[in-house]
Amino acid sequence: MSVKKVVLAYSGGLDTSIILKWLIEKYGCDVIAFAADLGQGDELDGIHKKALETGAVKARVEDLREEFVRDFVFPAFRANAIYEGQYLLGTSIARPLIAKKQIEIAADEGADAVSHGATGKGNDQVRFELAYMALRPDIKVIAPWREWDLKSRSDLIAFAKRHGIPVPVTKEKPYSCDRNMLHISYEGGILEDPWTEPDSKMFIMTADPQGAPERPEIVEISFEKGNPVAIDGERMSPAGILGCLNKIGGKHGIGRVDLVENRFVGMKSRGVYETPGGTIMRTAHKAVESITMDREVMHLRDGLIPEYSRLIYNGFWYSPEMRYLQSMMDMAQESVFGTARLKLYKGNCTVIGRKSERSLYQPSFATFEEDDVYRQDEASGFIRLLGLRLRIEALVGKSVQ
């Protein structure tokens, strides 16, 4: 494949540092290193300089934090997306935005190819490339892990040493990390043994729950159309909301998850995640939904969450079925206005209150005390009609015995 200029999704980590140099050697092309600022913090320090020193003709660092939370995280959380009951999709939901920006930069810079650092065993290769196809089907795609003869992380470390490329991964600390405003994921190395407990020093976003504050903290989160808009009455931007919840949740050890998930390519994978703000946000959102969402709408929506979450996990963010499902999810949020009050304490996030001017919860109907709005004797006819088919089946069964 002939390539003149490629836009590389560049993190400055082990894989993409090697890939940058490898692309130049393999294809003799110009490489534009693109780093998406999704809230990695100090991980981006010096990344511009490092990319240029490694051989990139240009390095672009784009601040995408607000767009990431507003247009990707919030839509997913409006749908209560969660993969296999545990994973809040922190890595999965970031890939379509990175791919989208890569395509935009390729058009801006006159590049004829894009490249990513995903391995041939993982999910990210699918997520990136399905997005490329949906957004610019004619773009050339280079996936080095499917081309080169480097077979392991150890091979990459050796390659880096030969070329004088500094990398943040060593043989003593071989697991890889992916960080953004929503979460940090850890995988590989000692974590590949699902029986091995993660090193407590590994965690970055969250305190050890055992060492978290001895006093619980109360936080109130307000929602409009399913989106969080304020914390303790103070309105903030989407990224401001998530950043604040990360800080509060991290202090109390909220949002650590250790799981074995099913990758799209067919194998199982062990991952450890920190998602403090997202865990709080989802808990609060469900609490407000519980008093504002119609029962049948909620049950119908809940039945769609597994499929919606699989679409994100498997890389179909830009698919027609995703657009269809998102429109349904958002329609279900039209009445979700209100505030949830939560107690945070040593890794636990507990709902202790919820209120809304649009609440469907009416004490006058639900009370166990005397009321004048509900006739309890009317339940007899309701139950008899519900049980009619059961009675008929039982009668027929007895008649044929």
Image (cartoon, grey):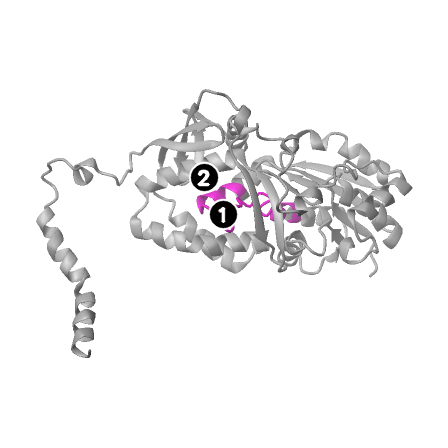
Q: Is residue 112 visible?
A: no
* Closer-to-camera residue (107/289): 289
Q: Is residue 379 left or right of residue 303?
A: left
80 in magenta: yes
Q: Are marks 1 and 2 in contact (CB under 8 Å)?
A: yes
Q: Tell me residue 167's x, y (percent).
A: 80, 37
* Closer-to-camera residue (168/272): 272
* Closer-to-camera residue (160/258): 258
Amino acid on which the number 2 mark rests in the picture: Arg
Q: Is residue 336 left or right of residue 125?
A: left
Q: Tell me residue 396's x, y (percent).
A: 18, 75
Rendered image quadrant of residue 287: top left
- What residue is drawn where x is 85% and y is 36%? 53
- Residue stretch in magenta: 73-99
Amino acid on which the number 1 mark rests in the picture: Ile
Which labelled disc corresponds to residue 282?
Answer: 2
- Between the C-alphas of marks 1 and 2, the distance is 10 Å
Which labelled disc corresponds to residue 72?
Answer: none
* Closer-to-camera residue (184/212): 212
Dot 1 falls on a residue whose secondary structure is loop
Label 1 sits on residue: 82
Q: Tell me residue 288's x, y (percent).
A: 36, 38
Q: Tell me residue 398's x, y (percent).
A: 17, 74
Q: Is residue 319 above or below residue 349?
A: below
Looking at the image, how many numbered discs can be counted on the residues? 2
- What residue is drawn where x is 69% and y is 29%? 42
Q: Quadrant of the C terminus?
A: bottom left
